[in-house]
Image: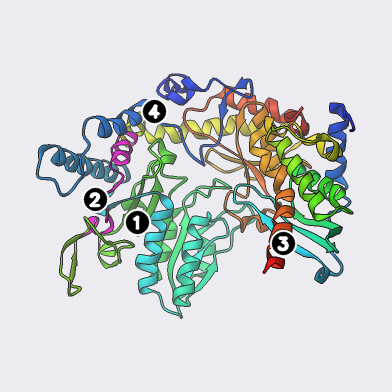
């Protein structure tokens, strides 16, 4: 498990905000599932794109208008879930939200997402730190739902 | 002259909130809602603790007392804005008031060839109900162009008003840019063109003297909670003949004189025809106390004080190289800004970590973003209980406004 000093945590957040690797729109959108996440209480308005092949996430990206916290948290999320199975991604989602809401969590799977451990200090921003993750969960769960049908 | 330090003693919110995030508590989000003086809270409690009964239909002393009180508050509100008592309709707030006009007047009278004029600076509450009217009547909605500062001017209205224009609906003070619009001149142009004028007074009535007869607007609406009154209270003023012509948004108990099961209904005269169901009686008690409180301080004093405090703030903010001001020349206590290269919501969080309450975002005036050319702004909004200390705290915090992640570490 990585251990970050506060200075490193700040750097990681600002790097993912200033230069988000996964902030883009897919060239071939038909291969992706997507969900638009906008909020009545803030300006964030992003669309999450997820490409799944044989139950495995092969690509994940997002685009739209977003603050530092939502941009960085969603970009890190993309890093974490690409090449994971849907079940693995959901497990990481659960650990991340547990961390955000100050419940016990499995640190091993969160890597850079650990930089958001202090989000509850600014409780009004929890929605920014989770907007991408909540979108991911919705896509995965809705898709499972469709398959059951 | 008004003494904000003494005034703050009237507000329990200041007694009970000395600090936020370990810093001096500094409330600068008054365009969203305002704090309530003890007298308003006491008035609401008086209804619950001593005078609970339903209005309009009681045959006993207590119910009569409530009837008299509601009537007294209606009179007070009327006097507060220079109207007649029967022209004051109690609502749940500005949004309900505007919906009432949109459905009760717009939906009833507008036709496909008719036009509604708005501006791009309007709050969602003064846009979405009209969109609904357009959907239902197929009428047109167009926008009066704003000048380069973002103001609505009578000249620009003259350029676009035409024989199809039936309703002009604009804010007297817009919630993002805070300019005071010359409603009197706007009303004159509207009436010369056979158009009615609806005024959104949510950001103006709490901050300046209002006289509807002088303005000559056809409707003006406002919320109680932005003027030291309880949440869930609001007012619709309308010229009496228009109120008579309009439909009620809701019908039911308390707004009909008689009805039979064949469908014959005789509604009461305005304003009661619009007040079906049990009203927010405790809220109305509180609204009356809020009017008393503001009247005692004096609306002219409030307007003057807020303007001076604004000037003080602008003189300090102008000196900060990292701050972009969007409405330097506005008259009211609404100051819209950004810190260079900082997303507005991140700045608002940073200010929160410094004990300061402001609002970030598009402030519901989503269309204005295209005009301001920014995704959002930070809005600082003052009221008469704010002090120079509040401004100094804001300015000091904004000096280091780029250090947004300090809020988390």
Using a 10 Å C-alpha cutoff, classify the residue at mark 3 as few (fewer than 14 neighbours), some (14 to 19) or many (20 or more): few
Q: Quadrant of the N terminus of chain B?
A: top left
Using a 10 Å C-alpha cutoff, classify the residue at mark 4 as few (fewer than 14 neighbours), some (14 to 19) or many (20 or more): many
Residue A144's tag is 3
Mark closest to the chain's N terminus, 2 or 4: 4
Chain hosting mark 4:
B
Q: Is residue B137 above or below residue B104?
A: below
- What residue sits 51% from the left and 35% below the top? B307
Residue B174, position in %: x, y? 53, 50
Residue B155, position in %: x, y? 52, 62
Q: CA distance from mark 4 to mark 1?
A: 32 Å
Q: Is residue B325 toward the left or the right of residue B99 in the image? A: right
Which segment is the magenta one? B269-290
Quadrant in which residue B189 is drawn: bottom left
Q: CA distance from mark 3 to mark 4?
A: 54 Å
Q: In the depicted view, which residue is nearer to us: A148 or B177?
A: A148
């Amino acid at each position: 498990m990585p251990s970050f000093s506060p200075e490193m945590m700040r750097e990681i957040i600002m790097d993912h905000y200033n230069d988000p690797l996964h902030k883009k729109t897919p060239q071939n959108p038909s291969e992706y599932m997507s969900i638009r996440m906008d909020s009545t209480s803030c300006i964030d308005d992003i669309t999450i794109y997820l490409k799944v092949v044989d139950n495995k996430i092969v690509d994940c990206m997002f685009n739209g208008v977003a603050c530092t916290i939502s941009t960085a948290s969603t970009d890190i999320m993309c890093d974490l879930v690409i090449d994971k199975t849907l079940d693995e991604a959901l497990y990481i989602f659960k650990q991340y939200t547990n961390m955000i809401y100050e419940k016990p969590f499995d640190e091993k799977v969160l890597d850079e997402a650990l930089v958001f451990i202090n989000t509850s200090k600014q409780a009004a921003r929890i929605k920014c730190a989770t907007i991408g993750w909540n979108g991911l969960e919705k896509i995965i769960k809705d898709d499972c739902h469709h398959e059951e049908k | 002259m008004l003494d904000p330090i003494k005034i703050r003693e009237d507000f329990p919110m200041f007694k009970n909130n000395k600090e936020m995030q370990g810093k001096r508590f500094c409330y600068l989000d008054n365009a969203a809602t305002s704090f309530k003086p003890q007298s308003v809270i006491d008035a609401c409690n008086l209804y619950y603790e001593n005078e609970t009964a339903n209005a309009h239909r009681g045959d006993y002393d207590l119910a009569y007392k409530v009837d008299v009180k509601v009537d007294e508050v209606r009179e007070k509100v009327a006097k507060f804005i220079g109207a007649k008592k029967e022209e004051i309709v109690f609502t749940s707030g500005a949004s309900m008031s505007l919906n009432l006009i949109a459905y009760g007047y717009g939906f009833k009278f507008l036709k496909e060839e008719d036009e509604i004029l708005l501006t791009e600076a309007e709050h969602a509450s003064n846009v979405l109900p009209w969109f609904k009217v357009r959907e239902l009547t197929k009428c047109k909605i167009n926008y009066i162009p704003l000048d380069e500062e973002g103001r609505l001017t009578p000249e620009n209205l003259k350029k676009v008003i035409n024989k199809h224009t039936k309703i002009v609906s604009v804010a007297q003070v817009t919630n993002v840019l805070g300019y005071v619009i010359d409603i009197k001149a706007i009303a004159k142009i509207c009436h010369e063109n056979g158009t009615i004028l609806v005024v959104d007074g949510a950001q103006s009535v709490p901050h300046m003297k209002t006289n509807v007869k002088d303005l000559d607007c056809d409707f003006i609406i406002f919320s109680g909670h932005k003027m030291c009154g309880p949440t869930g209270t609001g007012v619709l003023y309308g010229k009496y003949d228009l109120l008579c012509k309009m439909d009620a948004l809701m019908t039911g108990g308390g707004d009909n004189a008689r009805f039979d099961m064949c469908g014959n209904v005789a509604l009461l005269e305005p304003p009661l025809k619009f007040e079906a169901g049990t009203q927010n009686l405790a809220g109305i008690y509180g609204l009356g106390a809020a009017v008393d409180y503001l009247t005692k301080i004096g609306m002219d004093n409030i307007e003057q004080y807020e303007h001076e405090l604004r000037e003080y703030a602008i003189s300090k903010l102008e000196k900060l190289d990292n701050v972009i001001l969007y409405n330097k020349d506005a008259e009211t206590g609404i100051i819209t800004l950004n810190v260079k290269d900082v997303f507005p919501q991140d700045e608002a969080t940073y200010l929160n970590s410094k004990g300061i309450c402001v609002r970030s975002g598009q402030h519901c005036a989503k269309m204005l973003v295209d005009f301001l050319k920014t995704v959002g702004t930070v809005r600082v909004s003052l009221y008469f209980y704010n002090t120079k200390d509040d401004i100094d705290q804001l300015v000091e915090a904004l000096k280091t406004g780029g250090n947004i992640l300090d809020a988390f570490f």
